[in-house]
Image (tube, grey):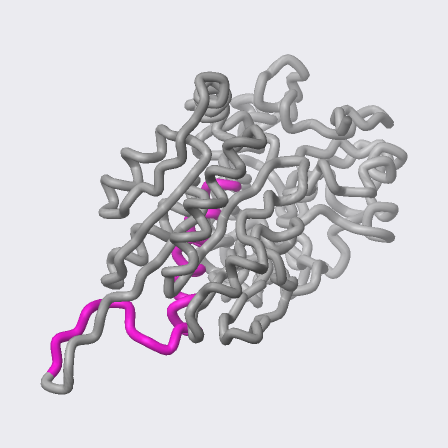
Amino acid sequence: MHIGIPAETVTGETRVAATPDTVKKLVAGGHTVLVQHGAGVRASYIDSAYEQAGAVLIDDVYTNAQMLLTVRAPQGDAIKRLNAGTIVVGMFDPYRNPELDTFATQHVAAYALELLPRTLSRAQNMDVLSSQSNLAGYKAVLMAANEYQRPFPMFMTSAGTVKPARVVIMGVGVAGLQAIATARRLGAVVEATDLRPTAKDQVESLGGKWLDVPMSPEEQEKAKQAAASGYAWMPGEQYIKDQAVIVDKAVANADIVITTALIPGRNAPRLIRAETVAKMKPGSVILDMAVETGGNVEGSVVGETVSTPNGVRIIGTPNIPSTLAAQSSALYANNVFNFISTLFDKEGHLELNAEDEIQKALLVTHGGQVLLKRG
């Protein structure tokens, strides 16, 4: 099969969907890999490395590939250049993507990697959300530390004692846990909160303090179901009020706050209001990792660092994994390779299986139809 690797066109996207290592595996599997000139340059994978791995460098992979591996789904005219029957694998932002109908019209089989059933053990090595969130949580702490005008650890000096930074992490998924671990390694005092009570043990195992919010029996059951599915849930009105009180106090006393809360198919939940930001100390830093989907923080702006009247800096950097493009690409490419390996039989022949629970979950357009239920 002819497998194409395009240069990403979304502004700020520096990752690439295949590395020389995964190209070598694909070539060994009997496939012809077509890499667009310069596709990996921004991730430090140069053209000659792909050639040495056995790839063919070309200018137009869209019209020549039978399967296209991408980081972000193709957009606009690029979709219309795809031949009928082309398989596209990548991150589609499926619940928000306004062009799924165009993919269907082109008779493209589109697999959205974000829809992976994360509770399946055999799917863990395909989980792009986890691999990218892990790196994002790490880098978010470094970005916040760079903006913060004081050190993270406690210093004992002849001129006086420097207190450790107080860091609050909101949302303890993959990104949040890595953020806790990174902040602790840098010497900060860390507090964390999440909608899943089961996250308490994870937070404390990393040396963080759990910010507990009382839950009704009904909410405890919802949280339990959410933990089983691997995703967040929408709490009731009373829980939101109780959480706001605890969050308000913790955030007001924090030096650095990192928010990571995302809900698939919906705008990011608003966790920090302007009145809470107004209580924070001058020089405090907030990094909103959900800024691209509406933001967890009132006042955060995509692509900007906002300074509030009381001297708080709110960082709205989008697509944080792209700031670690080389490693993000390496992990992402491995995830993609592991997934597309399920689309071929042992002889390397395409063998799509509509009943396979992973393939079925990821397939959003096929046979001229949009299969994803977006309601």
Residue 208 to residue 66: above or below: below
Q: Locate residue 357, reporting x and y percent.
A: 58, 17
Q: Residue furthest left?
A: 158
Q: Locate residue 324, reporting x and y percent.
A: 47, 61
**Left or right: 309 with respect to 330?**
right
Q: Locate residue 165, reporting x and y percent.
A: 29, 65
**Left or right: 198 with respect to 75?**
left
Is 151 in the magenta?
yes
Residue 264 to residue 209: above or below: above
Quarter occupied by residue 369? top right
Q: Residue at (24%, 58%) from the top-left corner?
A: 185
Quarter of the image where the C terminus is located: top right
The kind of secondary structure the magenta stretch mainly shows is helix
**Left or right: 156 with respect to 136?**
left
Q: 326 or 215: nearer the eye?
A: 215
Q: Residue at (43%, 74%) from the top-left corner?
A: 283
Quarter of the image where the N terminus is located: top right
Q: Which residues are magenta?
A: 129-157
Q: Residue at (58%, 33%) from the top-left corner?
A: 340
Is residue 175 among what the camera can see? no
Q: How many marks?
A: 0
Is 191 in the magenta?
no
Q: 261 or 240: nearer the eye?
A: 240
Q: 195 or 36: nearer the eye?
A: 195
Is residue 277 among what the camera can see? yes
Q: 317 or 359: nearer the eye?
A: 317
Q: Locate residue 149, reporting x and y percent.
A: 37, 78
Q: Residue furthest bottom?
A: 159
Q: Residue at (65%, 26%) from the top-left corner?
A: 350
